[in-house]
Amino acid sequence: MPTDMLGREYETFPVPSPLQQHGPARVIAMCNQKGGVGKTTSSINIAGALSQYGRRCLIVDFDPQGAATVGLGINANTVDNTIYTALFDMRVDVHDVVRRTAFENLDIIPANIDLSAAEVQLVTEVGREQILNSVLRPLRDEYDVIIIDCQPSLGLLTVNALTAADGVIIPVAAEFFALRGVALLMQSIQKVQSRINPNLKVYGVLVTMFTRTLHCEEVMQRIYEAFQDKVFHTVISRSIKLPDSTVAAAPITMYAPNHKTSQEYREVARELVANGVIA
Ligand SMILES: Nc1ncnc2c1ncn2[C@@H]1O[C@H](COP(=O)(O)OP(=O)(O)OP(=O)(O)O)[C@@H](O)[C@H]1O
Ligand SMILES: [Mg+2]
């Protein structure tokens, strides 16, 4: 039996069996208001790995920076329809906003800087927390997983993501300030649970940017004290191959399939299937 970075023993996660049919999708919010912890990288690469296991994946870029969009090779400044148009223009069919990527089973709803106006515009909308949920509803039956790549904030866009989601994955970078702000994030999740979306789960905490140093191991221990069994067995190492793959506009499992980091992202994907998060 393998042992994880916390010394916990676990069963290896088997390669998922092929699906006979697709959908309804699990909707996952990739969420942490701390910037640069690996939300976008994990959205792209978990979806990338799952798509290679035959799961139909949709990434919703929910950050005006559009990093997930760019990271999958789409120039968001040249597309007419983005998540912004889907949110605010009732005439737009969400199917026309979805873009195929160069990769099988991997689609995206792009975002660009237009989305930065949404936070203010949402305030006066009817059912302002529920808009993303309604936008995504017609797509649920067509995918096995929908991953919402949140922006680093706890504003109304993120509340929309938590309202639309079945569960949250919290990427946490293995560094000194790892847990800063996490209490606030958990409060936001609890508020959404008690007021809007009682079924919202915390699927787990994904430790990223890990190096085998005493410092990282101490941080890892503190993350475990805070989240206990919610911490995924799989840990993502720090690797220059990840920014490289973003520049190459491909998930790492396609850019460098044999690299250690590809194995790690495939392992998280298998862990999610083994945990029953994804079919
Ligand atoms: N495991 C890793 N090893 C090395 N670099 C990484 C790793 N994960 C992410 N990065 C790099 O760190 C930077 C931040 O990662 P990413 O954009 O995924 O974080 P984010 O949480 O989405 O950030 P933001 O809050 O700005 O949206 C990027 O340049 C990315 O390529
Ligand atoms: Mg991001």
Image (cartoon, rainbow, N blue to C red):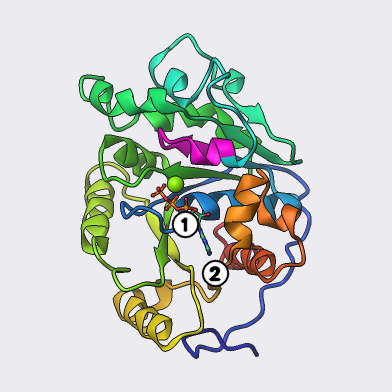
Whether pointer 1 and pointer 2 mark residues with C-beta atoms closer than 8 Å, the reply is: yes
Residue marked by disc 1:
38
Looking at the picture, how far across and down is residue 106, in whole percent?
68, 41
Q: Which residue is mark 2?
A: 236
156 vs 190, nearest the viewer: 156
Amino acid type indicated by mark 1:
Gly
Residue 162 drawn in magenta: no
Range drawn in magenta: 59-70
Q: Quadrant of residue 73?
A: top right
Q: Secondary structure at mark 1?
A: loop
Q: Mark number for residue 27?
A: none
| Residue at x-position 68% and y-position 71% | 260
Residue 137 visible from this viewpoint: yes
Which amino acid type is marked by label 2? Ile
Residue 272 coordinates in the image, percent (x, y): 58, 63
**In the image, 14: left or right of 132?**
right
Q: Residue 276, how many percent across, how many down?
A: 57, 62
Disc 1 crowd, CA 10 A, few/some/many (<14, 14-19, 20+): many
